[in-house]
Amino acid sequence: MWCGCANEFGAPPNTHVCPVCLGLPGVLPVANEEALKLTALTGFLLNCTVSRYGEVRPERTTSYPDMPKNYQITQYDKPSTLAGWVEFEFQGDLARVRITRAHLEEDVGKNFPFRAHSGVDFNRAGVPLMEIVSEPDLTSADMALRVSQRP
């Protein structure tokens, strides 16, 4: 989200990291323009209000070993997309799920437990992650499955 490191699934551990995604002192992050554009596009597709400005800031202080900065940068408080909805057919009717927001966050690393110790792969730490938050409109597991299969 904030650097130019590759996002390659299955790459050897800790081969796609840099001072920015590791949160080292003195680094200067630069926002991933494509991630910001895709979040706005998602907002339009989800019938959301898309703000001209969103805000990203450090949130969610953690003490997990897979979070190298010990905090996550997110749009949680001031997302760029708000108050939308998605419709889909369900049991012969048209169902609607209200969307609270779609916001960007950065992903965390991945813990690997071994027999006597554990390791952490930071390759995906900092990768853009879009979270879509809905209202509690899904009333069954079947309904959740159907909305996930929506074309």
Image (cartoon, helix red, strand yellow):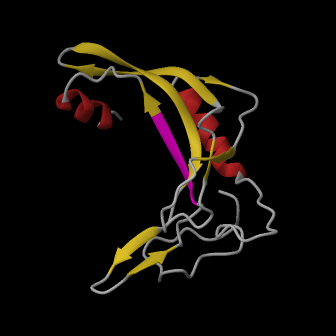
- Specify the quadrant of the image occupied by residue 14: bottom right
Residue that appears at 28% across and 24% down = 138
- Which residue reaches farthest top? 93
- Inspect the magenta stretch and tell me whether residue 130 lies in it: yes
Does residue 33 appear to the left or right of 77 in the view shown? right
Does residue 32 appear to the left or right of 126 in the view shown? right
Residue that appears at 69% across and 43% down = 56
76 up-or-down from 34: above or below: above
Q: Nearer the viewer, residue 52 or 121?
A: 121
Residue that appears at 31% across and 83% down = 114
Q: Position of residue 69 (x, y in %)?
A: 63, 63
Residue that appears at 19% across and 15% down = 92
- Specify the quadrant of the image occupied by residue 96: top left
Q: Position of residue 121 (x, y in %)?
A: 48, 75
Q: Position of residue 134 (x, y in %)?
A: 42, 27
Q: Nearer the viewer, residue 131 or 89?
A: 131
Q: Quadrant of the N terminus?
A: bottom right
The region drawn magenta spans 127-132
- Specify the quadrant of the image occupied by residue 32: bottom right
